[in-house]
Amino acid sequence: MTNPVITALDVSDREAMRSLIKQLAPYGGIFKLGLEMFVGFGPDIVKEVIASGGKVMLDLKLHDIPNTVKKAAKNAGLLGAELLTVHASGGSAMLKAAVEGVKESGSKTKILAVTVLTSIDEETLQKELGVEKSVLEQVKSLAMIAKESGVDGVVCSPKEIKAIRECCGPDFLIVTPGIRPKWAAVNDQKRIKTPAEAIDDGANYIVVGRPITEANSPAGAMKDILKEIENR
Ligand code: C5P
């Protein structure tokens, strides 16, 4: 089984990050680097994770004019990221530009589109952002635009996995955070699923942060999650 766990490296010091990578890289999963680390430590952080044997999901959620996104995506490809995130709401021209940028870099970086942030509820979507659709309808519509633009997949909440799998087919990548094994603290996550449930629903990858990074044994937590998925 390829390891479907993407470990969210939301740590603010480099040594803590190095220690986590050392313990977890042997399991072959991907490490998610977000804006905080990328802005704080600079692009070299991506190269450092790769040099330590990890693969990188570069969670930059790019959203700009197509030409700028194309160049940023090209640079992410040159850094060697495995996965790169962009905002689907940037529209098809921007999404196609991101795909084009990665292609120009000659790398195999896959692009994932973020649909509607889970911090945006229906009221904000409709009253502030002027979108008439429900959150789920908007998520599905953006996922389909992403697919038609040549994007490889989406990042979505666990409750949207089934609907996206249904509308975007079996080859579209689905990555979902909001994952909590039964033994883990819920923290501030609201709508959670277990690793096994998310994979059963059709996710290709699950993003797991604190249940692994704050465990007494991060490698032990990773092993337990992989066992849970295998034995489902
Ligand atoms: O520690 P935890 O497992 O909650 O971390 C989940 C990771 O996924 C964090 O990096 C968080 O920012 C990200 N994320 C999320 N929920 C979303 C989108 C991203 O938890 N809707």
Image: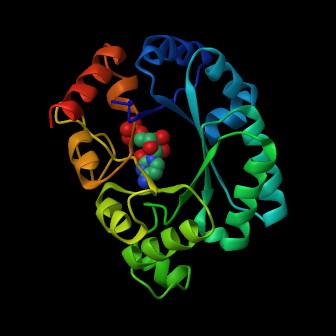
Residue 213 on image: x %, y % = 40, 24
Residue 84 on image: x %, y % = 62, 46
Q: In which quarter of the image is the C terminus?
A: top left
Q: Please name the residue shown 84% across and 62% down the image.
A: 67
17 or 95: nearer the viewer: 95
* Residue 15 appears left or right of 154: right
Outermost residue toward the bottom?
132
Q: Please name the residue shown 35% across and 25% down the image.
A: 212
Ligand 1 located in image quadrant = top left
Q: Quadrant of the N terminus?
A: top left
Q: Establish if 88 lies above or below 203.
A: below
Q: Please name the residue shown 50% across and 72% down the image.
A: 144
Residue 98 on image: x %, y % = 72, 57
Observer able to see residue 105: yes
Observer able to see residue 184: no
Q: Establish if 127 lies above or below 218.
A: below
Residue 215 falls in image quadrant: top left
* Residue 181 appears left or right of 18: left
70 or 183: nearer the viewer: 70
Q: Please name the residue shown 27% across and 48% down the image.
A: 198
Residue 147 on image: x %, y % = 54, 66
Give the colour scheme of this rendering: rainbow
Residue 76 falls in image quadrant: top right
* Residue 182 appears left or right of 111: left
